[in-house]
Amino acid sequence: PSIMQEIRYASHYNFLGRPLMGYKAPTCILTRQAAKSLKKVQTDLKSKGYSLKVYDCYRPKMAVNEMKGWSETEGCLLMRKAFFPREAKETLFQNGYIALYSGHSRGSTVDLTIVNLKHLAQDKYIPGQHLKPCHQNNRFKDNSIDMGTGFDCLDPKATVKSDEISETVYRNRLFLRHTMMRYGFTPYHKEWWHFTLKREPTRKYYNFPVQ
């Protein structure tokens, strides 16, 4: 319960700019196995003065379908600067930033970061406010340790081993990556925040709402 939750798809601060279908509450839902493994990660991090913060956990299939429909609709570029400033909207699927069948819908995939417990302050997003590109240093202030981009920055710089990041950012990404792997999670190389339990208990895609 000490893991911080900032479920972005239940809010307006995401690449669609609105709460997604099926997110009736800003709550992290995971399979029991994934949750137990994540608890071990949190215990490890807390002993070092850090905490996990989750951005997304189980994702209903209806939300995945909404992302697909959005990608095929002209316009709807309200949040482009903040989330995909260097990518064309119509290429987000083919470039691997969004999937038609998301592992999140199986309940053992999680998007997260690490927060230093001594630095918890962050900006609060107000719908419609002017935002900076997510790959720049002056991006929206999150309380994550510096990972080089914001969460859900659909950009090459979000790749774990991007050649655009500093040595400090690279070490931070490896800190998260190695800690998660130690407790049974597999990383996704294109997104520093994305991890899936190595031994998923189910391969079924679910569609019940988050509430």
Image (tube, rainbow, N blue to C red):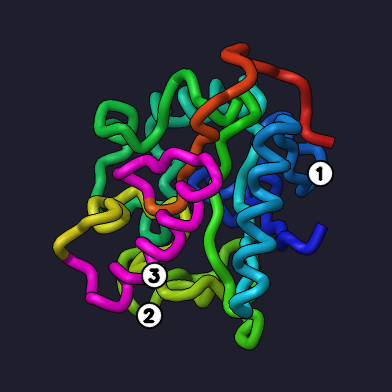
Q: Which residue is mark 1?
A: 25
Query: Split into 4 quadrants, where in the image is the N terminus?
Result: bottom right
Q: Earlier in the sequence, mark 1 or mark 2?
A: 1
First in sequence: mark 1 or mark 3? 1
User: Which residue range is magenta in the image?
Assistant: 164-191
In this view of the protein, which residue sits in the foreground, 94 or 89? 94
Q: Amino acid at mark 1?
A: Ala
Question: Residue at point 39% right, 53% down?
Answer: 192
Q: Judge the density around disc 3: few (<14), some (14-19), many (≥20) Cα neighbours within 10 Å.
A: some
Q: Nearer the viewer, mark 1 or mark 3?
A: 3
Position of 204 relative to 32 (above/below): above
Whether 89 is drawn above or below 52: the answer is above
Residue that label 2 marks: 138
Which of the two labelled residues, at mark 3 and mark 2, occupies the earlier sequence position? 2
Using the numbered discs, state the Cα–Cα distance from disc 1 to disc 3 in whole angstroms: 30 Å
The residue closer to the viewer here, 189 or 40, is 40
Cβ–Cβ under 8 Å for marks 3 and 2: no
Question: In this view of the protein, can residue 66 be seen by the observer?
Answer: no
